[in-house]
Amino acid sequence: MTTGHDGVELPNDDQLAELSRDELVRLGTKMDGVELVEYDDPWPVKGTRAEKRAERVVAFWFVLGALAAVAFIVVFIAWPWQYQKPGHQFWYGLYTPLLGVTLGLTVLGLGFGALAYVKKFVPHEVAVQERHDGQSPELDRQTLLAELADAGNRTTIARRSLIKRSAIAAGSLMGLGLVVFPLGGLIKNPWGKSQAPQDTLAHTGWYQDPANPERVFVRKDTGDPHEVALVSPADMDAGSLQTVFPFRESERGNPEALQAALNRIDNPVMLLRFRPQDAARVIKRVGQEDYNYGDYYAYTKICSHLGCPTSLYEQQTNRILCPCHQSQFNALEYCKPIFGPAARALAQLPIAVDEKTGYFYAVHDFREPIGPGYWERGA
Amino acid sequence: MTTTNSPRRARSRTKVRRRLSGLLALGVALVGAGALYSALVPTPQTAHASGSDAAQQSLGKQLYENTCITCHGANLQGEKDRGPTLIGVGSAAVYFQVSTGRMPLDGQSAQAVQRQSRFTTQQIDAIGAYIEAHGGGPLAPTKSDAELSQGNPAQGGELFRLNCASCHNFTGQGGALSSGKAAPSLQSATPSTMYTAMLSGPGNMPKFSDRQLTPQEKQNIISYVTSVQNGNNDPGGDGLGGLGPISEGFIAWVVGIAALVGVTLWIGAKA
């Protein structure tokens, strides 16, 4: 026996070979300065009925978890999940709850099983560990410092400034790359020369390219994104609202373009038809006298405050409401704001009827940028 | 306890039997009451307009002159500061306004209030026929409620979100408008009232002509609404008001997190 750290008697090789596992455990904890005060076997008498029952309880929870997991897989794959009409929804209606119940039971079974196992079978130990006072001994500290300094010196890193600086450059630039990853998408110049005019904030999807003039027709959404349904003046009753989107003949048969026209955020336009008695009271804005077609008026759906869809149209009071911040616009007076935080009128889209087909089209884009203000917009 | 005929065991067994039979009797009574109810309940109101029947029109004229004439005038022309003209509103508007109890009006307010109808289906049809014969306008549908809710709820949902959801909320919970007006909840709306509301544009609701939304598209919208009203859209249990992320997020955070913390404390206390 030799004496090692903390006064623990260390066995030699022969003695080590003779030590039992229990003695090895005691020795190991003692070497770490840990004293096992209490380390009771929860089942000192083996094979009792109580022990077997405890084992079955633990196994019960794990088996429950396993069965619930199998049930989850079966439900996920085989349960009727397709939407059913009201009245036939019993089995379909159970789909979501069953997924939750089975997955929940799985997690619960695993957790309770682990808890029960720890409670019933892990020995209840009370261990005491000696606490070292103060810092490490002077000897340990000095030798460690010397080793570190030696490592630095021998690898010559202290005087290799080229390697040091290039490594720092690589590391910090990689960090910068990680910052660019989420933020880089925000870098763009909306006023650059290469930007198409219709993609700037000043214009919308109703923009007509002067180099390639093509009539921009007024199209409604029928719920089928690839269907082209144009609007004619006979389609709407007095006192009605229709949300419309731009359509060009060159887009016909092009599913991506047809879908994109419905998705683009600055495209939705409210096509309103006033009641005759209301249409007689309309006050038009200077310069927009010919923007309407009879009782039909078209205004952007994008609120001039923060860009919410302002489609709450009251057909008798002729107010248009924005649901986000309760702005109200008077549709009979070029959609001037009359209540709420919005400060600018909703932009009006000039509309006319195509002579050949009889459908509405937009004469040109809005004469002002739509939606919320931005730095370069001015008032 | 291995003996099977101990008195305690026997007593508990009779107790179980008594409870089971009680439960069974309750179940039978409930099912019976349900069956009786479904057998005896009258068929729901539906709009049936037949414009040309002279007897119906004279009944309609009588009802009109008893209840509507004060505000809408002897010739449907309307009275200043009381009621609008009824020329051109058609039997669809009559069906919607009268069957939902909005007309006859309680009193001048921000908008008409929904309540129990004061007229029978025959009387409503008679008034509708009278208005239709004297002013014309969109006709109330002749189809039954069951036929009107036949449609494609998926396309109806698209159209509902595009045309209706801005005021009525995406699951038809309704919402506020300006100056005390409100878009009503659709939870109790019948297919006929929804159809006639779309056609006639009651109050401040815009009109949706048959060229703007075809009859089939209207039926699709109705089939969507019937699929989300009356708890039909709550496969997870409670709809939490159908208001979207606000109520759902609130419940998830407050109730869910509180429950998790509670369970954690409980596990910690037991361990």
Image: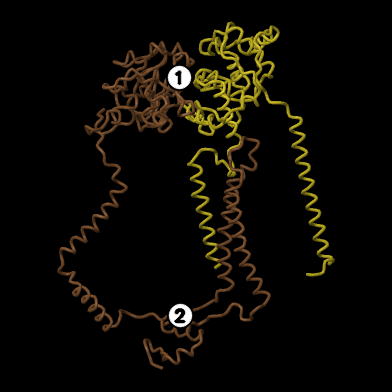
Chain colours: A brown, B yellow
Q: Amino acid at mark 2?
A: Val
Q: Is residue A168 above or below residue B209?
A: below
Splitting the image into 4 quarters, where does residue B240 fall?
top right
Provide residue B264's location: percent of width, then percent of height: 52, 60
Residue bearing mark 1: A317
Estimate the x, y position of residue B258 in percent, counting from the top left. 51, 54
Report, in whole angstroms, how far the alpha carbon at label 1 lies from the one at label 2: 82 Å
- Neighbour class for label 1 at 10 Å: few (<14), some, many (≥20)? some
Picture quadrant of residue A160: bottom left
Camera-side mark, 1 or 2: 2
Q: Residue A128's mark? A: 2
Q: What residue occupies the far bottom of the structure in this picture? A: A1
Badges 1 and 2: C-beta atoms under 8 Å apart?
no
Is B181 left, or right, of A174 in this rendering?
Answer: right
Q: Are marks 1 and 2 on the same chain?
A: yes
Q: Earlier in the sequence, mark 1 or mark 2?
A: 2
- Tell me which amino acid carries mark 1: Thr
Quarter containing the C terminus of chain A: top left
Identified at 17% across, 69% down, the residue is A158
Mark 1: secondary structure: loop
Q: Position of residue B262 (x, y in %)?
A: 53, 58
Q: Quadrant of residue B226?
A: top right
Marked residue chain, label 2: A
Residue B121 in percent (x, y) is at 68, 19
